Image (cartoon, helix red, strand yellow):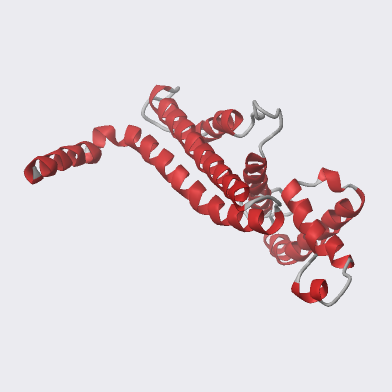
Amino acid sequence: MTSTLESMKAAIERIVLNPAHHDMLAILKGARNGAVYGAKVRFPHALVMVFLFRSGSVREKCGLVLRATRTHARNLAKFATIYKFLCYALKHYGPTPGKEGPYDTFLAGLVGSYFVFGQRSRRSGKIPSVNQQIVVYVFARVVLALAKLAVKPGHGLPVVSRDGVSAALSYHAWPVFASLSWAFVMHLFRHHPDALQPSLRSSMNYIYLQSNDWDGLRNFLWHNK
């Protein structure tokens, strides 16, 4: 029995290590890594947010945590699969077979994100909150990366990427960016709260509105309500 299992393991390992299968197996591992990473990131976040800020029984809260974790893990796995498969197809069957094109990653990301993150829920007709959070997270980092590239000497925009100008902008940009971001979000929260993403609105409501009310020492320091 042991020898049979060892033989099977050795055969499978030969397949896994065969360079001819590398690209297709990379798609499978991409799906695996997307699912694992999604579960690791979402589970602790959902656990804290649901049990701190959502009402309902323990069973209902556990269900919400598991659904959010499953959605995050599934969607990252699906996107990784589509993205890596399209990169593989474009590389081997594109205009220059065997060579990655300059826009392959852009096209693969565009198609993959449309089908995974760009669709509304069939049940509610709304954009799933998990997808909103993932896309907003990615968008924020894309904007920061583009801002850095804009002032990067040799790669950026004509005026702001000059050596002296680039260094000055890089040094002063963060405090300006941080100040404007918080100024806008506080103004929106005060005058247009429905425009904000629900989880952000919920956390801001807890910090800035619910802190206005108490009727004794108990819910002034030890409890919120």
Residue depicted at x 71% and y 56%: 53
- The location of residue 96, given as percent across then percent down, is 42, 25
Q: Nearer the viewer, residue 211 or 164?
A: 211
- The location of residue 22, given as percent across then percent down, is 30, 36
Total of numbered circles in the picture? 0
Rendered position, 134 above or below 99: below
Question: What quarter of the picture does the N terminus occupy?
Answer: top left
Rendered position, 78 above or below 146: above
**Would you say residue 78 is visible in this rendering?**
yes
Q: Nearer the viewer, residue 37 or 91?
A: 37
In the rendered structure, the answer to whether residue 181 lies left or right of residue 25 reads: right
Quarter location, residue 204: bottom right
- The location of residue 67, given as percent across then percent down, is 57, 42
Question: What quarter of the picture does the C terminus occupy?
Answer: bottom right
Rendered position, 217 above or below 146: below
**Would you say residue 152 is visible in this rendering?**
no
Residue depicted at x 21% and y 36%: 15
Quarter location, residue 129: top right
